[in-house]
Each structure stands twice: as structure tokens, then as C-alpha cells.
Image (cartoon, rainbow, N blue to C red):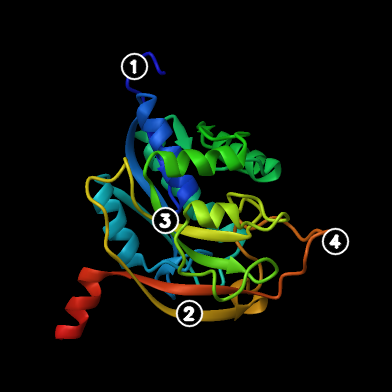
């Protein structure tokens, strides 16, 4: 626990790993000044997860923290991503924020990449769930009463039937042997909607399921953070299944207009 209530910025994806990391950092006594999320400006959705920007706004509001947005272009490059993130980090550094929190678990290259970028602006990274056994993390997630829906799956591991399911004991028990329990290699992504970090739970509605080939979801040079690089020993990814999620309140309001 820090000797004082140190202020930190948190890089937020909206998924279960972010939720677990945020829970740990708050319980450790840090003060989170904002949750920072990158959005695709063209689609108005969270990169890779496919979550609507409006839904993530409601999620962060339910948590009760400010949301810091970074918008990148439809075919954003590493250079654009790094430049925009660097500008945000410099602004928070000027406000006295020295550390940035991430929910990464064991991707060493990604960890070093984050640390190197932050070092350029004189900041450091915190990884509250780093190197924790991913099956233990998933059990911790359920034990704390978190709730999360699978919003995106890699078709090398899962099919259409998996998106839209809740992460529960049955999901954990039925995980294929070649899938990391937390999906740390990009096998799946999730959206957290209830748990100890929330002031109130969201009411989520599962909508249309859509399949996107790799060339559509990863056009050109994809900005980091990105899924694990191809491994000849692992199944080949041809595309991703997404499901559209929305809050019940938003869906009902749309029906009345």
C-alpha cells in the first residue's frame, strides 16, 4: 500500500481484467484520477472489444470515475496511437501524475512497450495483476461478484455461440485446454457490468452478432495494444465474432423515438 494516497491514471478497456486490476489498485489505497480508453473515431467503439462508446460511458459513470477519451482514426497506425497517447500522458504528468495502471497479465513484449513509452514522458507503469495465474484471477473475479459478458471471440478458439455469454462457473469449467482462462492471448474479450467497483450494476441487452475477417478488424498497421503475434503452434485466426451490447435504458429510449 502506498505511504500516501497516490494519484494514478488507469488505462481502461472495459473488460474483466481491467475490472480486476482496478479493484486491486483501489483496495491498495491509490486514487484513480481517470479511466483512459482508446476509441476508433470512425466506428465510435472501443478498439478490438467493439463496445459502443456510449455504453462504455455508461459503464464508467456507473463506476463513478472520470473518463478520458483518446480517439484514433479508422486505420490508425502505431505512430498515431503513440503520438496521441503521449500527448495525454504529458498532460497528466504536468498535473503531477507519475504512474499509469494497466491490466496486463503476462505479455512481456507489451509490458516493455508500455514502460518504454511512459519513460519518454517521465512516467512509470503499474501492473497490479501481473504474473498472477490466470485461472486464479478468473476465480477471484467470480468470488468478488463481478459480472461480465463476452463481447468478442477469436474464431480459432470459439464460435458464434460463445459471444453474448456471461463469464460464470460453467464458462470456466468448459474452457478449451488451448485457451488461456483470461484470454490473455486474444482468445476472447469481455465487458464488465457489475461488481465491487460499481456504484450500481448496468442492465445489459445482447444484440446482433457479426463476423469480421482479420483484414477488416486489423486493417493496415494496427496500433498497440494488440493481440499476441501469430504462433505456428496455435490455431490460425481467420476472423472474430462480435456481439453488439447496449444498456436496456438506451435500447428502450431508442424504441420510443
Residue 5: image location, x then y, percent:
32, 22
The crowding category of the residue bearing disc 2, from other C-alpha atoms within 10 Å (few below 14, some 14 to 19, many at least 20), is some
Q: For this rendering, which residue is in front, 66 or 248?
A: 248
Circle 1: element type = loop
Could you tell me which residue is drawn at 66 percent across and 78 percent down? 215
Dot placed on the residue nearer the N-terminal end, 1 or 2: 1
Cβ–Cβ under 8 Å for marks 3 and 4: no
The CA span between labels 3 and 2 is 17 Å
Q: Quadrant of residue 75?
A: bottom right
The crowding category of the residue bearing disc 3, from other C-alpha atoms within 10 Å (few below 14, some 14 to 19, many at least 20), is many
Residue 195 is marked as none
Q: Residue furthest left?
A: 256
Q: Please count the marks in the image.
A: 4
Q: For this rendering, which residue is in front, 219 or 92?
A: 219
Reading the image, the residue beneath label 1 is 4
Cβ–Cβ under 8 Å for marks 4 and 1: no
Residue 209 is marked as 2
Q: Which of pointers 3 and 4 indicates the residue nearer the eye?
A: 3
Circle 2: element type = strand
Q: Could you tell me which quadrant the C terminus lies in?
A: bottom left
Dot placed on the residue nearer the N-terminal end, 3 or 4: 3
Could you tell me which residue is drawn at 36 percent across and 28 percent down? 27
Could you tell me which residue is drawn at 44 percent across and 44 percent down? 142
Residue 241 lies left or right of residue 220; in this view the side is: left
Q: Which of pointers 1 and 3 indicates the residue nearer the eye?
A: 3
Amino acid at each position: 500500500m502506498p505511504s500516501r494516497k497516490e494519484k494514478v491514471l488507469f488505462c481502461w478497456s472495459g473488460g474483466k481484467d481491467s475490472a480486476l486490476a482496478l479493484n486491486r489498485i483501489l483496495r491498495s489505497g491509490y486514487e484513480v484520477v481517470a479511466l483512459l480508453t482508446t476509441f476508433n473515431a470512425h466506428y465510435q467503439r472501443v478498439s478490438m472489444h467493439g463496445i459502443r462508446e456510449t455504453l462504455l460511458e455508461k459503464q464508467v459513470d456507473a463506476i463513478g470515475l472520470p473518463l478520458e477519451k483518446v480517439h484514433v482514426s479508422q486505420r490508425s497506425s502505431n505512430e498515431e496511437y503513440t503520438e496521441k497517447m503521449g500527448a495525454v500522458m504529458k498532460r497528466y504528468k504536468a498535473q503531477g501524475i507519475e504512474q499509469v495502471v494497466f491490466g496486463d497479465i503476462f505479455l512481456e513484449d507489451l509490458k516493455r512497450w508500455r514502460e518504454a513509452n511512459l519513460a519518454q514522458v517521465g512516467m512509470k507503469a503499474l501492473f497490479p495483476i501481473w504474473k498472477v495465474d490466470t485461472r486464479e484471477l478468473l476465480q477471484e473475479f467470480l468470488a468478488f461478484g463481478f459480472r461480465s459478458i463476452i463481447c468478442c471471440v477469436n474464431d480459432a478458439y470459439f464460435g458464434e455461440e460463445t459471444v453474448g455469454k456471461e463469464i460464470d462457473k460453467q464458462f470456466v469449467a468448459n474452457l478449451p485446454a488451448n485457451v488461456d482462462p483470461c484470454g490473455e492471448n486474444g482468445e476472447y474479450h469481455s465487458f464488465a457490468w457489475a461488481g465491487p467497483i460499481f456504484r450500481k450494476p448496468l442492465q445489459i441487452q445482447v444484440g446482433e452478432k457479426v463476423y469480421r475477417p482479420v483484414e477488416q478488424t486489423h486493417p493496415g498497421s494496427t496500433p498497440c495494444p494488440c493481440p499476441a503475434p501469430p504462433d505456428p503452434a496455435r490455431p490460425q485466426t481467420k476472423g472474430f465474432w462480435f456481439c453488439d451490447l447496449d444498456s436496456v435504458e438506451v435500447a428502450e429510449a431508442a424504441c420510443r423515438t
